[in-house]
Image (spheres, rainbow, N blue to C red):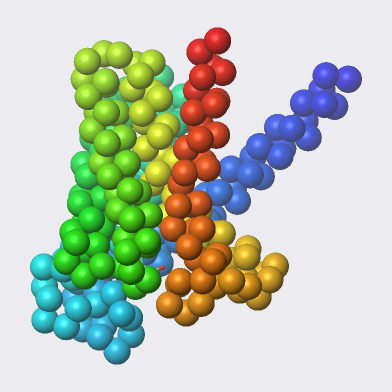
Amino acid sequence: MGFQVWRPVGLAKYLAAALGAVLVLAFAEYSLRFGLRGLGDDLTLETHIYTPGGWGVNLAIFGHMAVGAVIMVLAPLQLVGRVRARYPRVHRITGRVVVGGALLVALGGLAYIGLRGTVAGPLMDLGFGLYGVLMLGAAVQALRFARAGDFARHSDWALRLFVLVMGSLIYRLHYALWYLATDGLGSTKALDGPFDQVQYFAFYLPYLAVLELWIRRRRV
Ligand code: HEM
C-alpha cells in the first residue's frame, strides 16, 4: 500500500525536477547568448535595451544577463542535500560564485534602471528596483550567516536568494502562460497594461511570501 502511494509521488517529483531543469537551461541559454551578443555587437536595431555608444550601461545590462544565466544554473545545485553533505567544499565554492554573481546581477540591473530606466517607466522601475535591492540583501545575508556558522539563518536567506534568482524565469513563465490562456489580455507592447503592471511585482513577492510561511512552519 505504502509502495503504491509513494511511487506516483516520487515520480511526480522527478518529473517536476526534470521540467524545472529544462526550463532553467533553456532560459539560461537565451540569457547568456543575449548577454554576450549585447556585450560584443551593436544591437541597436534589435532591442530597446541596447544604448548606442553607451558602453557602461550596455556592460551593466548585458553583463547582468550573462552572469544571471550562470547563477541560475548553479543556484539549484546548492539546494541538493547530498551535494552539501558529500562535497562541502563544492557547496562553499559554488555558493560564493552564486553570491558574487547575484551581487553583480543586481548591481547591473539597478545601474541600468538608474541610468536608462525600464521600458515602461517609474512603476516598472520600482518593481524591478525592489527586486534588485532584495537580491542584494539576500545575497549579503546568505554569505554573512554562512561565515558566522549560523546555518539555520544561512539556509533561510539562501532560499530567499534562490527564489529571487528564479524570479527572472518565473516572470517569463507568467507571460508565456498568460499569452497561451488569453492571447495577452491586459498586456501591451510597451509593458504598461494592467497585466504588465501586476507583473512588475508578481514574479517575486507572492513566491517570497509563500516561502516565509514555509520557513515559519519549518521552525515550529
Ligand atoms: C538570475 C537573474 C536574472 C536574469 C537571468 C536576468 C535576465 C534578463 C534578460 C534575459 C533580460 C532581457 C529581456 C528579455 O529578454 O526578456 C533582462 C532584462 C532586464 N533585467 Fe534582468 N535578469 C536577472 C535579474 C535581474 C535583476 C535582479 C534586476 C533588477 C535589478 C534585473 C533588471 C532587469 C531590467 C531593468 C531589464 C530591462 C527591462 C526593460 O526592458 O526595460 N534583472 N534580464
Q: Is residue 33 visible?
A: no
Q: Name above or below for residue 202 compared with residue 35.
A: above
Q: Residue at x 19, y 61 (%)?
A: 114
Residue 57 x/y as whole percent: 16, 68
Residue 166 x/y as whole percent: 44, 48
Residue 181 x/y as whole percent: 70, 67
Q: Is residue 215 visible?
A: yes
In the picture, residue 91 is in which quadrant? Answer: top left
In the picture, residue 27 is in which quadrant? Answer: bottom left
Instruction: Looking at the picture, tell me which residue is in the foreground, 192 or 12.
Output: 192
Q: Residue at x 33, y 81 (%)?
A: 47
Instruction: Looking at the picture, tell me which residue is in the foreground, 62 or 80.
Output: 62
Q: Quadrant of the N terminus?
A: top right
Q: Residue at x 23, y 56 (%)?
A: 110
210 left or right of 110 in image: right
Instruction: Looking at the picture, tell me which residue is in the foreground, 25 or 62.
Output: 62
Instruction: Looking at the picture, tell me which residue is in the foreground, 59 or 91.
Output: 59
Q: Quadrant of the C terminus?
A: top right
Residue furthest right as drawn: 1
Q: Residue at x 19, y 78 (%)?
A: 51
Residue 45 x/y as whole percent: 29, 89
Count all numbered tags in the image, as a single digit.
Answer: 0
108 left or right of 22 in image: left
